[in-house]
Image: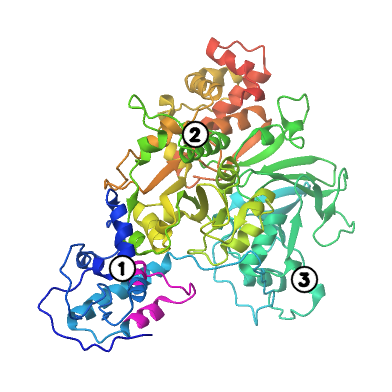
Amino acid sequence: MPRSDRPLVKSEKKQSTILELFDKSINSRGSKRKNEVIDLTNEDCSSQYCETIKIEEEEKAEVIEPVLCPLCNKDMSLLLMEEKVRHVDFCLTLHSNDSQSSSSSLASQLKSNTKPSSKVKKQKTNSNAILVERERFKNRKWSLDDDIKINEKAPANISCSKRRACIPDVKILAFEKSTSDLYKVAVDAFNYSPHEEIEQYFLTHFHSDHYGGLTKSWFYERVFGDDNDFSNDSKYRKILYCSEITADLVRIRFHIDRRFIRPLCLNKRYLVHVYDSSDLPDGGREEGSSNIPGLYVTLINANHCPGSAIFLFESISLDGSTKFILHCGDFRVNKDILAHPLLNKFSLEYDCPFELDEVYLDTTYFMSSYNFPKQEKVCEALAHMFNDLSCDKGTGGSDNKSLFTQWFGSLKQSRITDFLNPHNRAKKKFLILIGTYLIGKEKIAISLSKKLRNAPIFVSNVFSKDKFSIIRCLREAYLNSVLTDDDLGKEFGGDCMIHLVPMKIVDSNADLSNYFNHNSYFQHFERCVGVRPSGWTFSGRGASKSESFIPNTNSSELTDLIQTYTPFMSSLVDIMEHDPGYSYHEDILPQVPLGKTSTGKNDMSNRIYVVPYSEHSSFRELCYFLVFFRIKNTIPTVNIHNTFQMERMSSIIKSLETLRNVKLNRDVIINEKLEKVRKLMLSDF
């Protein structure tokens, strides 16, 4: 590194400022941008650092005086101009070229630069804390070519389960083998002690509130017990039954031996247990139309998250009687489910004698206030919004402002780092952050990408080291075609880049700004917009006033039921008749007016929109499901530990069952409002 031989001379003048670090070319660039606003508020540094960065003109000294970095206090007098710029740029953004380096190594690098005074020590203590915090929000490098590694090695020994709670009844399904003998299986029941009667466990989907409790030891404990002969292949058996995608996710996350898991294809009927002495391979076999006494299961897409399934159980007892149980897990009712060929024989739209003996229903949003719009409407509105904004289409009112100007402003903001950056590439207009769980919400990103001319999708690994491996298991062809390991999307055209991020990132403007700033994305994108999907955001809209008190009756007579539930049933008919609409002009953009954020601070670059996108069924969708399928007994699976909630849900279920019977019994005299339910068809969904 070239150094000057001129000695240092004490000067009476003030310490040099940031502008004196720039050469003439940089100053020239700055003069051309004099009409722009320099935004220092989003650098996300402590106030004491920001106070150090002052932009003012000073007379140039004819002697060399100390030029100290305003952040690390290093004397940069002997550095070349390019080196000064690079050093300050580093300290301002704290962006390490080695993305795998730890925060401690970065702090050590700064510490070795100079012997600090007590004041600087305090600054460095704060700086270290900032470094640690920044590392939490930084994406680590990964490659599309990275292999998925699964370690199936058996544990050295099995420790006895510390779980003492027994599997609750709502998670156990019982089937009659004969009049005096039951066969039991468990669904989504892994966080409990082993059950002596249960040898087959079913997992509806890969969300933690359903797979919670699964570990490598869980499998060995239930299959091997006290036996440690793990090398004996004949002692392994299938114990977990799930969809193919869910099976892959379980193996990747928990490194489970494939000999424990039975992946099942969607829309195929499997015989998984026999009630007589018939031979059956471990894990069962596909049986299209067999009537061998035993337990059959068919998986149907639950429209919840990738790999999620509805389980249609069919039990044929030794005396030939048949029982059907539908376990919905978590699901989002749509036309594909309501008109599914394998469920048609239970539908009112078909003249069939079959009915579902029991339905275990996802009652997450089983209240009339949660009447949010369909998934496709929300996805379509978001996609059109970003497409119109990126194309700068539309008008903002009488002053003829463009849509983008009206909601995001027309002023291009600049940061100090924009002046320091020697390569000023044109920035993309939007970095779009979609809040996700481990899996789920991918439909939003896919919808946006398609509308935005195949915008690239990057999977953030903040807070989740195996997120990308998980995404690769989803078997979504389009998603795989637009996935990229380039978080900036440099090789792709267009004005938008999509990131799948943890839900925490879009929970607050502070966390969103941390993600945007700590990864230096402000150098490449004009705006950062977070999308937080949640069905809870629609609570309170269109709630039925009569739901606050729903009368009850123990009578089973249809006329008594109609008389009891008519007021509430009338509101149910209204809900079923009207499909909620959704528009970005009315429902999304007005959430954050220009110049305002959720914190009330002026900020045109970052914002978060909350959209009523849910992967659980809305109340209206549940109404259609319960009215249009013949069901003997509906069993709620959510909000079941509160007596009031259980009584409320029971009354709603009875009301919907009464509406179903009104449709079936044309001879019953009803009022004009209820007559409308007889005219409702699945096509009205």
Between the C-alphas of marks 3 and 2, the distance is 46 Å
Residue 175 in sight: yes
Work out whether 30 lies above or below 443: below
Amino acid identity at mark 3: Tyr
User: What x and y, as percent, mark residue 189?
Assistant: 61, 57
- Residue 236 numbered mark, or none: 3
Q: Which residues are magenta?
A: 89-110
Nearest to the observer: residue 316 or residue 677: 677
Residue positioned 31% across, 53% down in the render: 32
Would you identify the image quadrant in which residue 536 lies?
top left
Would you identify the image quadrant in which residue 78 lies?
bottom left
Work out whether 484 lies above or below 368: below
Residue positioned 36% across, 76% down in the render: 83
Numbered disc 2: secondary structure: loop
Residue hosting label 2 = 372
Cβ atoms under marks 1 and 3 closer than 8 Å? no
Q: Earlier in the sequence, mark 3 or mark 2?
A: 3
